[in-house]
Image (tube, helix red, strand yellow):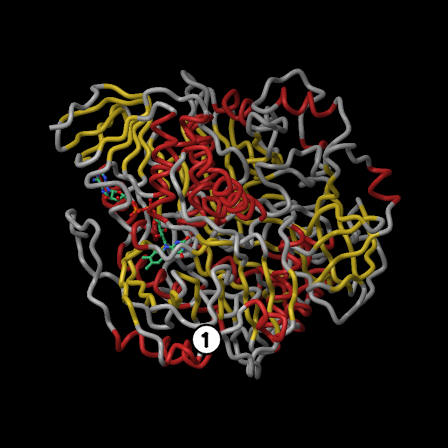
Amino acid sequence: MTTLPTQARAIIIGGGIIGCSTAYHLAKLGWKDVVLIERNKLTSGSTWHAAGLVGQLRTSANITQLLKYSVELYDTLEQETGLATGWKRNGGLRLACNAERMTEIKRQATTAHSFGLEMHLLSPQEAQKLWPVMDISDVVGAAFLPTDGQVNPADLTQSLAKGARQGGVKIIEDVAVTGILIEKGRAVGVETSQGTIKAEVIVNCAGQWARRIGELAGVSVPLTSVQHQYLVTEPIAGVPKNLPTLRDPDRLIYFKEEVGGLVMGGYEHNPKPWQAHPLPEDFAFQLLDTDTDHFEPLMEQALARVPALSTAGIKQMINGPESFTPDGNFILGEAPELENFYVGAGFNAFGIASGGGAGRALAEWVAEGEAPMDLWPVDIRRFGQVHRDRTWVSTRTLEAYAHHYSMAWPHEELESARPVRTSPLYRRLKEQGAVFGWKLGWERPNWFAPRGVEPKDVYTYSRQNWFPHVGAEHNACRENAVVIDQTSFAKFLMVGKDAEAALSWICANDVAVRPGRLVYTQMLNERGGIECDLTVSRLDDDCYYIVTGTGFAIHDFHWIRSHIPEGLDARLIDMTSSNGVLSLMGPRARDVLSAVTEADVSNAAFPFGQHREITIAGVPVRALRVTYVGELGWELHMPLDSLASVYDALMQAGVVHGIRNAGYRAIESLRLEKFYRAWSSDITPDHSPLEAGMGWAVKLKKNIPFLGREALTRQAMKKLPKLLACFTVDDPSIVLLGRETIFRNGRQVGWLSSGGYGYTLETNIGIGYVRDKENGVTLEDVLSGSYELEIACARYPAKVSLEPLYDPKMTRIKA
Ligand SMILES: Cc1cc2nc3c(=O)[nH]c(=O)nc-3n(C[C@H](O)[C@H](O)[C@H](O)COP(=O)(O)OP(=O)(O)OC[C@H]3O[C@@H](n4cnc5c(N)ncnc54)[C@H](O)[C@@H]3O)c2cc1C
C-alpha cells in the first residue's frame, strides 16, 4: 500500500508524457503539493511504444510555437536531470511526388517561414544526399526542416518525471483514480483505489482513458482509440546514425533511424479502431495483435521507396493503440462542464512532439485559470453536443485519421457522419444547389451551384470550381439583395435584474444602452486580448440577446457564464436551437423587407445599430440592423418553426429586386473587402482591440470598469507591438489562403491571418499584423512601408491599407 496524501493543490491523472510534462512545468511555475497518480507504471499507456518522431510545423502559429518549445526543452533536459532522452536533432525531410503536393510543400515552407521555423526546399537529388537509401525516381521535390528530430519517448518521459520530482512533485504509481469528487459544480478531489485525495485542481492526462475519466466527471473528452502499426528492421547498410526522419505522404508512410535500421509506419486510408469498450483498465505495457494484411499496402509503398527493405530483417512489428480526435488536434484546457477540471489528451500520434509545449501550456493554463495564449485550435471548448456521441466521434475521427497524409486541400470539408444539425431550410436549399459545409454539427450553405453545375467542391491549390459561383453571390449582395441562412449562429439570453451590471463588466464596449439598441462588442481577458466578439441587443431592462459565431457557441457561453461576477442576479440561457436566422443583405434589402412587413423600416425609423420586433408572414421576427458584409441589411431572428414561411415571403417579394441565395464563402469575400475581422484568425486572445484597429469598440473614455481595462490602458500609453492591416496582391495567378509571410521594406514583419479574394475589387485580399515587438509600430510606419507577400515560396508586391478596401458608396466596378 502506498501512503496517499489526503490533500494536494493539483492532482494529475496519468503518467504518460503529457501528465509528466504538465507536472514538470507546474513545478517550474513554483507549484508545491502537486501529485501525479498513475495506475500502473509511468509510460505504460501509449507513451512507451511511440515511434518518437518529433516534427514541429502545424497550421497554427501558436501550436507550432509549442512544438518549437518542445524541441528547445529536449535540447537541454538531459543536462538538467541527468537522465538520457535519446533526443537528436537530425532534421525532418518531407517528399513530394506530384505537382499539387509540391505546391503544398511550398506553401508549408512559407508557413514555416511565417512562424520562424527553418524549412528549405530541396531537389530530389539533394534530398537523396540526406537520405541515401531511398529511391527518388518518382520524387518531384522535397523540403527539409533542420531542427526537427527524434527521441526515445519512454526515456524522455522518465527524464521529465525526474525533473518534476526534483521540483517537489509527488509521483504515485500503481494507484488508479476511480472517481472525481464534485461539490457545487467544482472538481474538489479524486477517489482512488487506495483512498480519497482532496485538491484545488484536477488535470486529466489519462491518454485513451481520458474519455472514461471525463465521464466520471460529466465531462466530454471526444477521442477514439485507433490501432497504429509500425515495424522495426535490423540494421541496413547505408543508414547513417544522423539520418533525418522522413515523411512520404504520397505513399502514406514515415521512417526514422533506429540502431542502424529503420522504423517504418504509416497512415492507412482504412484505419482500424481499437473497438474495446470500455477500454481495459489493466492494459499496461501491452500491444495489440499485429495485422500484417492491413499493413501490407504500406509495406509495398515502403519497399518502392527503400528497396533495401526487401532484404532487411524485421526485428519487431508494433501495433499500439493511440487516441485520435475528430479534427486531428489535441484537447487542452478547462472543461466547460466542470470548474477546476482540466484536460490534456487526444494527441493524434504527435504527443511526443507536443509533449514539452503542451505540458507547459496546460500547466500555465492551470496556474492562471486562463489560457496563456490563443490555443483555440486545441481548446476543449471547440467541441459541442455532437462530440458527446461515441459513434459520431469514432466515425469522424476515422475519417480524419485517413486524411492524415492526404493533401490538406484549402477549404476542404470532412464528409462523414453528416448531417446532424440542420436548419428547417436544409432540404429546400439543397434542392436549389446548396453545397454545405460543417461547423460544430451544423450544416451551413457554403455556396449554391447554378442549374447544370454539379453541387460539389472540387479541390485544388488553384482557383476551385466554386470560384465564379461565389462571385455571382457576392455581386448579388453588392448590387441587389441576398438571403443567407445563418440559423446556426449561437444565440444566448442574459436575464436577471443584474444583467446590465454583469455584461458591463464582461463587455469592452458600452452595453448599458436603452432597450432597442444593438451593440457590437468584444470580451477581453486580463491581458486585454479578445476572447469573444459578438453582438449584444438589449431587449428589456433585465434581458439581453447575444449572437455569436456558430463554432464559438460553447467557448463564448463558457466565457460569459464563468465571468459573471459573483453575487449578481444574471443567468445565461442558450437559445441556439430555438431561433432560426435569415440574413437579408444588399442595397435592395429595404425594398424587400418593406414589401413583407408593415413595420416602418426606413432609416429614420429603424437606424443602424437598432433592433425591433416586426411581423413577416404572420411570424414575430426580431430584426437586427447590423451587417458583416458591408451592405444595408438585417439579421432576422425568429422561432425555428417559422423560418420557412419567412424565407418564402422574402424570396417571393425579392424576385423583382434580383434576390438570390448566398452562402458562407460569399460572406468571407464580402467581409474581406470591408476589412471586417474574424475571431479565431484576425482577432484572438493574443490581440487587443487597439492592435486590431478596433479601439472604437472599447469604452476606455467612459468611466466604467470592465475586464481587461487595465491592460488596455497600459497598452494605450505605449507604441503598439503590432497593428492589423489589409493587403492586396493584384497578380491573378496567385491564391491567398492565410499564413503567407508579410515583408515590409524587405524585412519579415508578420503573416496573413486571413486570405481570399474580393470580387468587387477584383483582387486578392489578405489581413495580417505588421509586427515590431522591439520598436513598436505606428499607423504611419504601416502605411509608409513597401510590401511584399511570400506565397508558396515566391514573393509578390503587395499594397497595404488600414481602411476598408470597399465602401458601398464607391463606384461599383462590376455594375
Ligand atoms: C504506434 C504509435 C506510434 C507513435 N509514434 C509517435 C511519434 O513518432 N511521435 C509522436 O509525437 N507521437 C507518437 N505517438 C503518439 C504518442 O505515443 C502519444 O500521443 C503519447 O504517448 C500520448 O501520451 P499521453 O500522456 O497522453 O498518454 P499515455 O502515454 O497513454 O498516458 C496516459 C496514462 O494514464 C494512465 N491512466 C489511465 N487511466 C488511469 C486512471 N484511472 N488512474 C491513473 N492513471 C490512469 C495510463 O496508465 C497511462 O499511463 C505514437 C503512438 C503510437 C500508438
Total labels: the figure holds 1
Residue 10 position, x and y percent, is 32, 26
Q: Nearer the viewer, residue 702 or 753?
A: 753
Please state, as top left, top right, bottom left or bottom right, where the N terminus lies in the image.
top left
**In the shown orientation, is residue 328 left or right of residue 758?**
left
Residue 40 position, x and y percent, is 19, 41
Furthest toward the right, the residue is: 784
Is 147 located above or below residue 757 in the figure?
above
Which residue corresponds to mark 1? 251
Residue 449 position, x and y percent, is 57, 75
Is 154 located above or below residue 312 in the figure?
above
Q: Nearer the viewer, residue 541 or 327?
A: 327
Q: Nearer the viewer, residue 174 or 788?
A: 174
User: At 69% across and 66% down in the image, what residue appears?
Assistant: 735
Quadrant of the rendered structure where residue 399 is?
bottom left
**In the shown orientation, is residue 610 left or right of residue 561?**
right
- Characterize the local packing of mark 1: few (<14), some (14-19) or many (20 or more) Cα atoms within 10 angstroms: many
Residue 18 position, x and y percent, is 37, 41
Circle 1: residue type: Arg
Is 759 located above or below residue 682 in the figure?
below
**In the shown orientation, is residue 554 left or right of residue 56?**
left
Q: Considering the numbered disc 1 on the image, is that residue within a helix, a strand or a loop?
A: helix
Please state, as top left, top right, bottom left or bottom right, where the C terminus lies in the image.
bottom right
Residue 185 in sight from this viewpoint: no
Residue 362 in sight from this viewpoint: yes
